[in-house]
Image: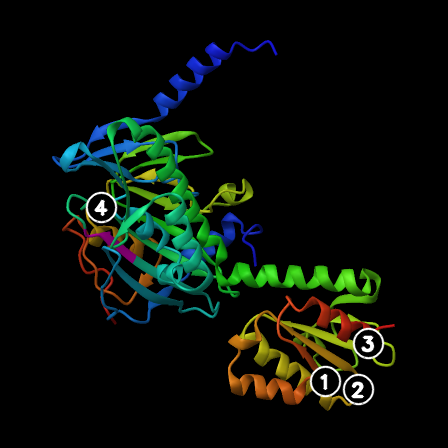
Amino acid sequence: MNLDINKLQDSLCSILCAEVKINPRNENLLSVETPFFFADGDPYQLYIREMPGGVIRLTDMGHTLMHLSYENDIDKFREGTRGKLFEQIKFETSLSEDNGEFFIETPLENLGFNLFRMGQALTKINDLTFLNRARAESTFYEDLQEQLYRIVGKEKVQKDFYLDEMEYSRDYPIDYRIVGKHLPLFLFGIPNRDKARLTTIILERLLRTKIDFDSLLIFSDQSTIGKQDLARLTNAGGEMIASLDAEADISRKLLRKVI
Amino acid sequence: MSFESLTDDKIADLINCQKRLTNPQARVVIKDGHEQINFNVIATDDSGYKFEVYKRKNTRDGMDDDFSCGLLWISPNGEVLTLRRYNGSSHNHRNQLEKNQLGSTHHIHFASEKYIKANKKAEGFAEPSTRYKTLDGALHCLLSDCNISGLKTVSDDTSQTFLFEIQ
């Protein structure tokens, strides 16, 4: 390697220094400009507050959660899977929280290290926004398709199928048609209550056309579907799988019906 | 639905269509140290578009300039996209594609095809604004710019008041 490590070190240090600026904001706060930005180009808002005993508090003054609340219900960051991740991030990065304000208290000599750690922590919290309902549903359909192709083979699966012999068939899409041993198998992915209701309507319509078919309903999480919705769907549909995690059950039920 | 196929024409269509707030009496909620109000908005033409207008204000001491209001489009599958956002002057926005910074000034974010195509957040581009100084003034500009009726607002420029009264 021909690189001069000392020159690299100096260069990197000067670049990093240039990216960090401290300015007075008011008599109690200094603002710290850093290279950390939200995806929309607004910077992480970081401030320094002097605390008793020579301790420095690096704080976001509550801006991060307010920023995330523009497009997200931030209550959900404290519930279920997201809530667990939220607490894990705070623990891993030694981030404290007081009524939505994130901060790290540090002696002066560790300020640089903790500035990076604060940036890392806020980035991880920002990434929790990727776990929203629409994205989770999209991932569910991708995972479902991947499993189907793996179990029965892509050539036997027809995605977004419309039964042409049915009137207004475009209004009644079938997620997947799979070539069956005796009957065509219509498979529906069900990530939420709305899709459960729509699938009930589609199945009722199919039954009215008096065509022979099998159906298989695979839920993202069956326990989240209301009792009445589930009862109606159970009456209209065939076999069910409670979640994609039950791959052995999906495989067994599919292969029993597929050529 | 992803927003990859959204064009500037479609964005203009979403911003320019006539809209109306359906819950103008929505109350302020204090959450995690900031004030929140969310208004539901519908298109009054036959497009069926749904939107949300939000107001946010940081209530901590010394953070008076940390406020924001914006217009979200709620797509048919529930994903949301910020069409416009009017920010206070608490921070130095950076336009990632133009590689410039605005300084600590009031600024307006605009959704654009250019940023979507570049795999950036749709509203990544912003311009400085002197049209408002307060959150209420910013909300007045937002409702005016985006054709939203149903709420009485007051411009920071006192010669322009009550343009959008409750009907």
Q: Position of residue B113 (x, y in %)?
A: 51, 45
- The residue labelled by disc 1 is A206
Q: Is residue A97 magenta?
A: no
Q: Are marks 2 and 3 in contact (CB under 8 Å)?
A: no
Task: Kindly report the distance in space between the C-alpha atoms of the residues bearing marks 3 and 4.
Answer: 67 Å
Q: Position of residue B45 (x, y in %)?
A: 43, 68
Q: Label 4 is placed on what type of residue?
A: Tyr
Task: Kindly report the distance in space between the C-alpha atoms of the residues bearing marks 1 and 4.
Answer: 58 Å
Between A108 and B128, the residue placed more toward the observer is A108
Q: Label 2 is placed on what type of residue?
A: Ile
Q: Is residue B57 magenta?
A: yes
Task: Kindly report the distance in space between the C-alpha atoms of the residues bearing marks 1 and 3.
Answer: 22 Å
Task: Kindly report the distance in space between the C-alpha atoms of the residues bearing marks 1 and 2.
Answer: 7 Å
What coloring was used for the rendering?
rainbow
Chain hosting mark 3: A
Sequence-wise, which precedes: disc 1 or disc 2? Answer: 1
- The residue labelled by disc 3 is A256
Question: Of the residues tagged 1 and 4, which is closer to the observer?
Answer: 1
Chain hosting mark 2: A
Residue in the image at 39% along x and 54% along y? A87
Residue in the image at 41% along x and 35% along y? B95
Chain hosting mark 1: A
Q: Are marks 1 and 3 on the same chain?
A: yes
Residue in the image at 77% along x and 61% along y? A149
Tag of residue A69: none
Specify the quadrant of the image occupied by residue A255: bottom right
Chain hosting mark 4: B
Per the picture, the main secondary structure of the magenta-coloured stretch is strand
Query: What is the span of residues highlighted in magenta in the rendered image?
Result: B55-59
Task: Kindly report the distance in space between the C-alpha atoms of the residues bearing marks 2 and 4.
Answer: 64 Å
In this rendering, is residue A113 above or below A251?
above
Tag of residue B132: 4
